């Protein structure tokens, strides 16, 4: 089976990877198997993409509707981790690469290929994510990128396509480099490379302008162990939950992000994102955790969440470290069940209510009205002991003339 004369290519159906099929064949002598996944990016059907791959010279085309797999096993892990790289980017591209890598490896095994190829440049995170993910699953597979390793530039591409009469007229070329899936959309290059240039309307497609929103939209999301299971009382799968929130939060312009980010390769880059569903769901999930996680567990989880996002951004989805963090995060979710009510309006998802059988919010402890069961007098002893180190240190500082300076009030 493994004749080592094949390679599998992560094929999007766009100009770069369409040209790459014949170009790789010509430059490496290997037959190309095109691999395409539906991860909720919309656009052309898998059938159309498959036919184009074959028309461009692929010997086989492996296509998979991976939307549920992506939502269940990738987006939901990101949701449980409230994953926001640098505090704002919900890892749209970063979580799709490991899934695509898994299918690339499966296709390589199925079709007897020894090499995996992708259309990434040598400057970004995605080349690292593909190749490190692939190495984590099957370290024997080799990787090659036509753009990075075989000098496939735009000029070469166009000349090559003409010369070989490749059927790529229907592959539109956007002024931006775009990567999108059901978790969100990433937009870069072109005039956005000047970080002073404001985004224009044509950058966006998952969100409407938040400056002119429709009437506010109230939504109730029910979670079970960290996963959204109902919206406004209707059962939903994770994929349906994300799609519905993309529509509803997108209509309100929620989830637009404009960021200079630190890439793994060391470059700072400017990227726009729109992730209405992800941002709305993470907002709701985070608030439910506020209710249901014990204080110390919650504090630790915030640190773990941040590290999880950094590891996943940094191409470590399959690494032992990420797997260990997954185990911690999963354990924290056992009581993250209940309902969150939010109002979506004008670019913001605002939580207005929360309820849960597993909530640690205790009305009788929290109330300032009658019915209070908290013994306020016990706080005296608590402060005595909690404040003890501060009192001892203050006495020492005063002895050495280093008391905290409190200037006298000179105002009449
Ligand atoms: N900068 C983002 C990341 O590293 C997105 C990368 C893909 N973006 C794109 N517009 N093609 O996860």
Image (tube, rainbow, N blue to C red):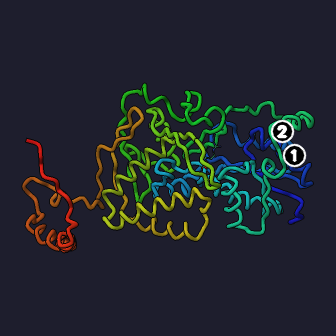
Q: Secondary structure at mark 2?
A: helix
- In the rendered structure, which disc, 1 or 2, sits on the residue that comes first in sequence? 1
Q: Residues within 10 Å of mark 2 (few under 14, many from 20)?
A: many
Q: Quadrant of the C terminus?
A: top left
What is the x, y in percent for residue 403?
19, 65
Question: CA gap, disc 1 to disc 2?
Answer: 9 Å
* Residue 375 found in image quarter: bottom left
| Furthest residue in direction front, as rendered | 401
User: Is residue 62 visible in the rendered structure shown here?
Assistant: no
* Mark number, residue 23: 1
* Residue 249 found in image quarter: top left
What is the x, y in percent for residue 157?
84, 38
Residue appearing at x 56%, y 58% in the figure: 73
Is 11 situated left or right of 22 in this image? left
What is the x, y in percent for residue 346?
40, 32
411 to 99, vertically: above or below: above
Whether residues under marks 1 and 2 lie with C-beta atoms below 8 angstroms apart, the answer is: yes
* Mark number, residue 107: none
* Residue 1 found in image quarter: bottom right
| Furthest residue in direction top, as rendered | 212
Q: Secondary structure at mark 1?
A: helix
User: Is residue 53 visible in the rendered structure shown here?
Assistant: yes
What is the x, y in percent for residue 390?
21, 70
Q: Residues within 10 Å of mark 1 (few under 14, many from 20)?
A: many
Identify the residue under disc 2: 157
């Amino acid at each position: 089976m493994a004749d080592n004369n094949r390679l599998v290519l992560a094929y999007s159906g766009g100009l770069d990877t369409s040209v790459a099929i014949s170009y790789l064949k010509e430059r490496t002598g290997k037959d190309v198997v095109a691999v395409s996944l539906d991860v909720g990016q919309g656009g052309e059907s898998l059938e159309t993409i498959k036919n184009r791959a074959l028309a461009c010279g692929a010997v086989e085309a492996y296509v998979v509707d991976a939307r549920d797999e992506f939502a269940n096993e990738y987006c939901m892990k990101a949701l449980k981790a409230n994953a926001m790289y640098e505090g704002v980017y919900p890892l749209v591209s970063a979580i799709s690469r490991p899934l695509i890598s898994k299918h690339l490896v499966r296709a390589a095994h199925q079709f007897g290929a020894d090499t995996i190829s992708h259309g990434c440049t040598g400057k970004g995170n995605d080349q690292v994510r593909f190749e490190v993910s692939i190495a984590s699953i099957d370290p024997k597979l080799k990787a090659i990128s036509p753009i990075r390793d075989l000098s496939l530039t735009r000029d070469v591409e166009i000349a090559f396509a003409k010369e070989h009469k490749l059927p790529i007229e229907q592959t539109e070329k956007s002024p931006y480099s775009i990567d999108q899936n059901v978790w969100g959309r990433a937009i870069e290059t072109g005039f956005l490379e000047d970080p002073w240039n404001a985004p224009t309307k044509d950058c966006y497609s998952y969100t409407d302008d938040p400056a002119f929103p429709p009437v506010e939209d109230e939504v109730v999301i029910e979670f079970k162990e960290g996963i959204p299971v109902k919206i406004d009382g209707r059962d939903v799968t994770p994929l349906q939950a994300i799609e519905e929130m993309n529509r509803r939060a997108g209509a309100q312009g929620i989830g637009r992000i404009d960021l200079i980010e630190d890439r793994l390769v060391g470059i700072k880059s400017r990227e726009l994102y729109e992730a209405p569903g992800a941002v709305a769901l993470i907002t709701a999930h985070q608030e439910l955790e506020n209710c249901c996680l014990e204080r110390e567990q919650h504090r630790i989880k915030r640190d773990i969440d941040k590290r999880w996002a950094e590891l996943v951004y940094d191409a470590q989805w399959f690494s032992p470290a990420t797997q260990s963090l997954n185990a911690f995060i999963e354990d924290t979710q056992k009581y993250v069940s209940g309902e969150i009510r939010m109002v979506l309006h004008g670019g913001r998802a605002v939580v207005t209510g929360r309820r849960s059988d597993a909530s640690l919010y205790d009305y009788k402890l929290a109330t300032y009205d009658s019915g209070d069961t908290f013994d306020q007098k016990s706080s005296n002893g608590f402060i005595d002991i909690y404040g003890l180190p501060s009192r001892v240190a203050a006495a020492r500082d005063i002895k050495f003339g280093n008391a905290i300076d409190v200037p006298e009030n000179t105002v009449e």
